[in-house]
Image (cartoon, rainbow, N blue to C red):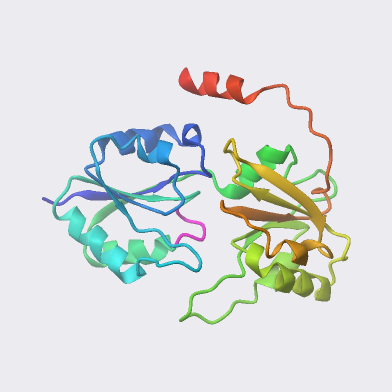
Amino acid sequence: MSGTVYLVGAGPGAADLLTLRAANLLARADILFHDALVHPETLALATRAEKIAVGKRCGRHSTAQRFINKRLVDAAGRYEIVVRLKGGDPMLFGRAQEELAALEAAHIRYRVVPGITAALAAAAEIGTSLTQRGSVRSFALATPRSGDDERSSNWIEGFHAADAGAIYMGLREAPAIAASLIAAGRPASTPVAIVVDASLPTANTHYTTLAGLPAYADVDVTGPALLLVGPQFHARTRHSTMHDADTRAIAQHI
């Protein structure tokens, strides 16, 4: 058997934010390799699949990327539908290119299914647009993290060139991030929104500035946190016209 490997975006957390294509593939999957932070409700959609956790968490035991690559190639020789489920969108900070390269080298068919990335979910969570007409016309996506065998990137230069941006996997490095951005010319008063568990019932947001950001490095956060940096991310009162119960009711009818 020569199956197809699908790199599927699990979205920011909430299962009802999956694309229809992603939900359909989960229901049909024979085997599922999933990241550590994929929500249990999303995994539950793969009713007939063998489920294998291959996620990576900072400071915890992780599955080596080369081993994940081999598992995908091997699975394609045994199963018709192989799903590699990645948090957010597969093509953003998910090492998808390494997995695709391994599949191409083994002549394995693959498809990529996009997902909602955390920056979009965080913007929706706090009701603040990532771009603003006339004031925020460019937006950067960046991460300061790099692998043990990788050279550090000069991400700060590209990030500072944009009007605003989102920093993934950066909360633990908050002091260095704040210092670097201020040294690059960002005002210490630049607003920062720290959005945790965007799209989930447990979501919460902390508002601060670049000057106050280092104090959040040691905050006990169990879920994924995203840093939104820019002039529009100041604290404000949000008046939602829809309650969580309304959202769930809509999702059940889709």
Q: Is residue 148 left or right of residue 111?
A: right
Residue 238: x, y in percent?
79, 33
- Residue 227 in picture, x, y percent from top left: 69, 56
Residue 254 in view, yes or no: no
Which span is picked out in magenta?
90-94
Residue lying at the far left of the rendered structure: 1
Q: How many marks?
A: 0
Q: Which residue corresponds to the image point at 35% horizontal and 58% vertical from the top-left?
A: 54
Residue nearest the observer in this picture, 131 or 124: 124
Horizontal and vertical percent position of residue 79: 17, 48
Regarding residue 7, the answer to whether it shows in the image is yes
- The reply, left or right, for residue 7 in relation to residue 222 is left
106 vs 29: above or below: below
Residue 169 versus residue 1: which sits nearer the camera? 169
Q: Is residue 118 above or below residue 97?
A: above
**In this view of the protein, which residue sits in the foreground, 135 or 73?**
73
Say above or below: 171 vs 66.
Answer: above
User: Relative to residue 161, is residue 109 depicted above or below?
Assistant: above
Rendered location of residue 27, percent (x, y): 30, 34
Which of the pair 87/201 is nearer the observer?
201
Query: Is 235 part of what is drawn in magenta?
Result: no
Report the residue at 44% width, 47% height from top.
38
The image quarter in which residue 26 lies: top left
* Principal secondary structure, stretch drawn in magenta: loop
204 displayed left or right of 185: left
Q: Residue at x 78, y 58 (%)?
A: 163
Dividing the picture into quadrants, the one containing residue 23 is: top left
Q: Residue at x 67, y 49 (%)?
A: 195
